[in-house]
Amino acid sequence: MHADRVVKLSIALDRNSPVPLYHQVARELERAISDGRLTRGDFIENELVLAERWQVSRLTLRRSIQELVDSGLLVRRRGIGTQVVNDTVPRPPRLGSSYDELSERGLDPQTTVLAHERMIADDAIGEQLGLPPGSTVVYIERCRRAGGRRIALLRNWITIDAAGDITTDQLAGHGLFDLYRAKGIWPHSAVRRITARSAGPVDASLLGVALGAPLLTVESTMQDTAGKLIEVGHQLYDASQYTMELSVVEG
Amino acid sequence: MHADRVVKLSIALDRNSPVPLYHQVARELERAISDGRLTRGDFIENELVLAERWQVSRLTLRRSIQELVDSGLLVRRRGIGTQVVNDTVPRPPRLGSSYDELSERGLDPQTTVLAHERMIADDAIGEQLGLPPGSTVVYIERCRRAGGRRIALLRNWITIDAAGDITTDQLAGHGLFDLYRAKGIWPHSAVRRITARSAGPVDASLLGVALGAPLLTVESTMQDTAGKLIEVGHQLYDASQYTMELSVVEG
DNA sequence: TAGTGGTCTAGACCACATT
DNA sequence: ATGTGGTCTAGACCACTAC
């Protein structure tokens, strides 16, 4: 009972490339899926055969396959084989600014800086940033537009270390993420709490929506690769214009 | 210039356990972090030393460390070492029912089945499930409660294959995920679209909220490990009672 | 019984960061 | 120059699935 198609693949590898072999193999497999040589339901040949044919060690091959399994394109089953489950790479949630995200959707994001100042962190913010009471932080409030319409209100409380020398001009042209990276700060992980609320008078007038309009709210805390807390962010999205999309793949 | 603490760890491994060695090592490392032997900023010893001391191959050790790197607890830097970045495991978004999620938060979720019937899928739903027009699906509408309060309204359109023989009784006592798994169907990945809206008359009365109250909405499409589309789900959460939480770690 | 993926080893060499 | 993590190999044995 095997109506299932087993596809023989040929690939080209460059052993002098600085790109790791396992990644080259993964890329080739991914290409085979995206250009249709492999489609949903197809099996690839078994690991011993592929390792021999492509002249890589089995472990290296396995690592390549694992990459695609992690990203949700392949599924492995012991005793059965490795099968294509997905034609397109599901997009996992990423650390990244809404600026990048809107760009990727083909919109042309623009930013208006509404506030950019130093202030004493209130207790809640200070605690989330792990700062002693009375610490100074940089407060930034921006309005994000796309296609001429106001999409989101972005409020950030950032440690002096991370944002002390960012200028208002820089904020208008770039997402915060780019500015962090330019300073050598590497955002590493974030916790996001997502819920909804009705627009109050301030939010409504800043976003240009009716009083009581539904807003999607995201509160986040972010830290860098050294474990240092960088910022607390509150984001308010006009729900009629913005949908947050994320893919989840079972670990 | 090394104020950084390098911690010497002792661990116990059981080589006869069915649990893979790399996972045992990972678990021990995780325990060392959670019980405070390792804290943020600490370095673990280098890979050669640890592999020798714990009598595992370097590759096995690396795989253990990788587990914690993936989950955001450790960071590795070439030429420098491996360092603890996080004390607690950030919780990545997972495939799982709100039932499981509410359970984990210590609440006691209860379910009322409001509808459970076969119906002809409308065009939008049929298309999302990849079914021909006029196909029959199972429609389920449930109200999820916790702590005696109504938290969410769950609407699912499920393929006959996946839900054809689920009974109403089963639905009252279990999350849909458990029922799928019991049938040998393994949810593999989902795409979720999250936004907000104001409660309409029907939603308001079913959830027991005021007309126009803010709701968090999640629309999802899910498929199993074989790549088959299983269900489309629409979930409405009372935003005053529910916050969606997710952690994102940079890949 | 045969075939598949899952785990583990010992050893080699490379690339990068610090001193 | 030294120490760190990153890649890669060849080979072994195990666990699960199918027939």
Image (cartoon, coloured by chain):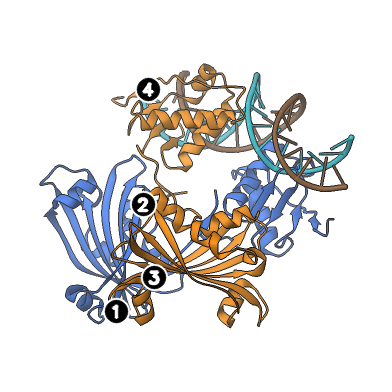
Chain colours: A blue, B orange, C cyan, D brown
Q: Earlier in the sequence, mark 1 or mark 2?
A: 2
Q: Amino acid at mark 4?
A: Val
Q: Which residue is mark 1?
A: B211
Give the image location of residue A58, x and y in percent: 71, 38
Could you tell me which residue is drawn at 61 percent across and 50 percent down? A69
Callout 4: chain: B
Q: Amino acid at mark 1?
A: Leu
Give the image location of residue A193, x and y in percent: 33, 57
Is disc 1 in the same subunit as disc 3? Answer: yes
Give the image location of residue A160, x and y in percent: 20, 48
Numbered disc in front, either 1 or 3: 1
Is disc 1 in the same subunit as disc 2? Answer: yes
Callout 3: chain: B
On residue A171, which mark appears?
Answer: none
Numbered disc in front, either 1 or 2: 2
Q: Which residue is mark 3?
A: B195
Numbered disc in front, either 3 or 4: 3
